[in-house]
Image: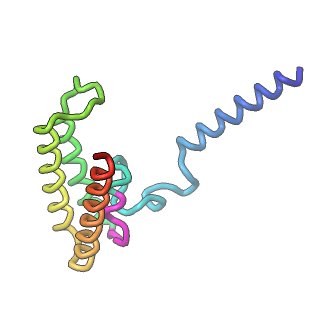
């Protein structure tokens, strides 16, 4: 009978962890995330805003810009790709879209924030280039 209790306790622990994970940390709304990281986006987008504190108005404008480009990226990526790597034309289109998105986001920022944003983009490019070099 003891092993049944252990199995039930283990299942309860897993279920509780899943629920807690889905809910996020206590108080984790837009306040608990990195600036610029409401909704989707990923770590790459968060890294662009390291050292930048956005006003609520800036955050809303950036969220709108990101939503616009997220929809465009969805159209560009073929749904039949099956999770494989996109072809070179698709990658080029995605890079062009990212460049346009970053330019629009940069226009929302103050001059001080732009300096930090530019520095973060340069750092991200450097890391990406290093990762590509390591793969080769």
**From what the image shows, is residue 9 above or below residue 55?**
above
**From what the image shows, is residue 29 above or below residue 20?**
below
Residue extent of the magenta highlight: 46-55
The structure residue drawn at horizontal position 28% and vertical position 73%, both measured from the top left corner, is 116
Q: In front here: 48 or 134? A: 134
Q: In front here: 77 or 126? A: 126
Q: Main secondary structure of the magenta part?
A: loop
Q: Taking 61 as reference, is 89 left or right?
A: left
The structure residue drawn at horizontal position 23% and vertical position 44%, both measured from the top left corner, is 70
**Residue positioned most to the bottom:** 112
Q: In front here: 132 or 6? A: 132
Q: Position of residue 58 (x, y in %)?
A: 27, 66
Q: Position of residue 4 (x, y in %)?
A: 82, 21
Q: Position of residue 107 (x, y in %)?
A: 16, 67
- The quarter of the rendered structure image containing the N terminus is top right
The structure residue drawn at horizontal position 64% and vertical position 33%, both measured from the top left corner, is 15
Q: Quadrant of residue 45?
A: bottom left
Is residue 25 within the magenta segment? no
**From what the image shows, is residue 32 above or below residue 15?**
below
């Amino acid at each position: 009978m003891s092993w049944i209790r252990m199995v039930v306790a283990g299942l309860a622990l897993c279920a509780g962890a899943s629920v807690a994970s889905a809910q996020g940390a206590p108080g984790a709304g837009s306040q608990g995330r990195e600036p610029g990281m409401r909704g989707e986006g990923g770590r790459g987008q968060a890294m662009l805003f390291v050292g930048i504190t956005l006003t609520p108005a800036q955050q809303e404008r950036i969220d709108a810009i990101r939503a616009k480009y997220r929809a465009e990226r969805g159209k560009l990526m073929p749904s039949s790709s099956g999770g494989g790597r996109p072809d070179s034309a698709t990658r080029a289109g995605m890079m062009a879209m990212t460049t346009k998105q970053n330019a629009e986001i940069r226009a929302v920022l103050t001059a001080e924030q732009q300096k930090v944003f530019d520095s973060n983009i340069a750092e991200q490019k450097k890391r990406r280039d290093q990762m590509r070099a390591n793969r080769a």
